[in-house]
Image (cartoon, rainbow, N blue to C red):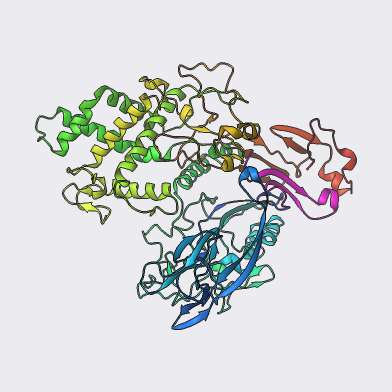
Amino acid sequence: MPSLFYQLGLDTQLLGGGDTHQAGLGVPGMPLMAVGTNGLVAWNQTQLMGDITDWYREELILGEDGLPAATRFQGREEPVVSTMETWVVADVPLLGSEGRIETWARYTTFDGRWIAEIEGRSASADEALAPGEGLVNLGGSYVVPGDLDGDGVITALAFDYVGLDGGNPLAALNAMGHAGDVAELAEATRGLVAYSQNIVAADIHGDVLYTPYQAVPCRDQLPRGADGGWEDGANPSQLLDGTIYGGFTIKLDGWKVVEGDPTACVVPFDEMPRSLSPAAGFVVTANNDPAGITFDGDLLNEPWYIGGPWMEGYRAEIITRRLTEQVAAGGVTVESTAALQGESQSPLGIQFTADLLAAIDAARAASASASAEEGSAEARLAALYEADPDRLDEAQARLEAWLAAGAPTPSGVETFYHQPAEGDDAHAVATTLFNGWFSRFQSAVLDDEGLPDVWEPTGGTGRSRAMTLFMRGRGPGNPEGLSSYNPETEESAFFDVLSTPEIETSDELAVKALLDALAFFESADGFGSADMAGWLWGYKHTVTFDSVLKDFLGDDPTYAALINPFSITTEQLPLAAEIRRATPAPSSPGFPRPGDQYGVDAANPGWSGTSFSYGSGPVFRMVVELRPDGVSGLNILPGGQSAILESPFFDDQAALWLGNQAHPLRFSPEDVAAGATGRERYVPLTGGGACL
């Protein structure tokens, strides 16, 4: 039950005499295939993290009615545009919604930037106002504009967004779905406005394509310095000075983006990152940096600015490595690619476990040393080891074996949908240990500084990037050039805990974080047992399928009777009639799940340290093999299970899939070529269904 993509077939050739002939994944109700194949081309996409929105600091001037009247721009007062909008609110008492009609003004600058925030005091919709005061509704928050900080200026935030200039990305997607080769598909992307996706494609001729193209303003109104960097107040990745720099414009010719217009400058199509049939024989996208833009440590020194920072590159690295191995071994198959899509190796485990093992070794050596001075970092490290040496030794042995095996992350739990393999128990315990440790370790390093939300583009990726730099930056001579480098400890000052008089080290924090994780898992909130053998990852790392109503109604037991029938829980689907494990089945409604943060089969549990439930991951993956004699493939469900997608239109026999069951439809390409409608050829299906 994916939240977005569903298996779909679109066809107007067979039954309507048209030219649409596609199978794959799409959004219900939309006659477009977001991910799929037309028999000649197959295409897929991931999030680009492109930057197509600019934010501006504005200086606002109020009218006599206390409402926005103008903004200051390049020494002038430019009038604000007020547009009245009417909202019809549904009457749904259960969800706290009172039926009504509301009319409010939306404000934009003279050149079309939407005003999103205004300095002033918070208010309510029905508040009585003083003479000269005005009330503004900004996304449901009510503000009486005013100079709240007394600096003589009423500031506001405005934004310009590519999608505000129109566009028809549905036309572009439709053209992509009818492309005969990857070159035609690339040409169709010229119509992508406000899309921001990495697109990969392959065609029946053997060509492969990567392109992230979409309409991106070239920002030529923003000046750069001699070094290529943006001048103060002109950096589009930060807040722009709206009193100096205006917005941008995207122009279209039909549904395609216009290039070369000096009044609507866009990053040229031919200068966007793109790869066509590289020597490696494959292209890869996994929300990663599209072209090594950040590899030099500078996001803003490229000829064109298109976005970033990007999501982690772990998945892309693993996929690239595995495909390279498969090519070297003689080729890539549907089965090998499907297995790769379901891979649940822990990239963070591979990267950071060795650091933890080294810290335990250092603590053990410190404990055996007779030369440690009282109060020194070495003495404190020895005391940490001596607090629980047997448990630390056991955890180290488990993690060493896990790392040597490649850090696999099985759930270790027997269910009706999964039978653990030999050795999964031990790997599942080690996965628990690593995730319990690393969540606490990064928190100890990063949380005591009281930093604001500086982690981009997401908290997890920003934190993992910082931890990578800090751990690599240890040693004499400041090897990573860290601005936080402390010559006394020869590592980042972030490893020091600010609330203590001592200057802690990375080894101290690493060992202490593991001790804290062991104590938690032994407690009633963890597994309630001191036996590590029962600390199976799948009992903590579970996925839940809640009704969408839960977002509105929460966990209030009053509404359980309404929510539960629309949820899928272990009460409705018991994990197994008999689970042959020492640890009892979890009482939560979740289903045990392999994987952890940033694996290929992403199953991100987050880093809270106490809750390891599946927080985010893939909706659907698909593998398609294009052959001269037909098309075959697999849909890869999260968790690594496969559903056959065997030539539903393009081979000797078409089929319809309900779940994992293939139901043949008795027609062939020859029938279609002879003009058969196929209507007389439907096979009755029990339980209903729709024919592709």
Location of the N terminus (image quadrant)? top right
Residue 392 appears left or right of 619: left
Give the total of numbered labels: 0
Residue 297 appears left or right of 320: left
Residue farthest to the bottom? Answer: 76
Compared with residue 247, is residue 339 higher up or lower down, i.e. above or below? Answer: above
Residue 623, image x and y in percent? 62, 42
Q: Residue at 64% of width from left, 66% of height from top?
A: 85
> Can see residue 624?
no
Residue 100, image x and y in percent? 67, 56
Residue 73, image x and y in percent? 46, 79
Residue 111 appears left or right of 468: right
Query: Where does the magenta region start and end?
Result: 1-30
Compared with residue 216, is residue 469 higher up or lower down, i.e. above or below? Answer: above
Name the foreground residue: 548 vs 508: 548
> Can see residue 181?
yes
Name the foreground residue: 10 vs 159: 159
Residue 141, image x and y in percent? 52, 59
Q: Residue at 44% of width from left, 69% of height from top?
A: 146
Residue 4 forms part of the magenta stretch: yes
Q: Residue at 39% of width from left, 52% of height from top?
A: 455
Residue 33 forms part of the magenta stretch: no
Name the foreground residue: 451 vs 156: 156
Residue 632 appears left or right of 608: right
Location of the C terminus (image quadrant)? top right
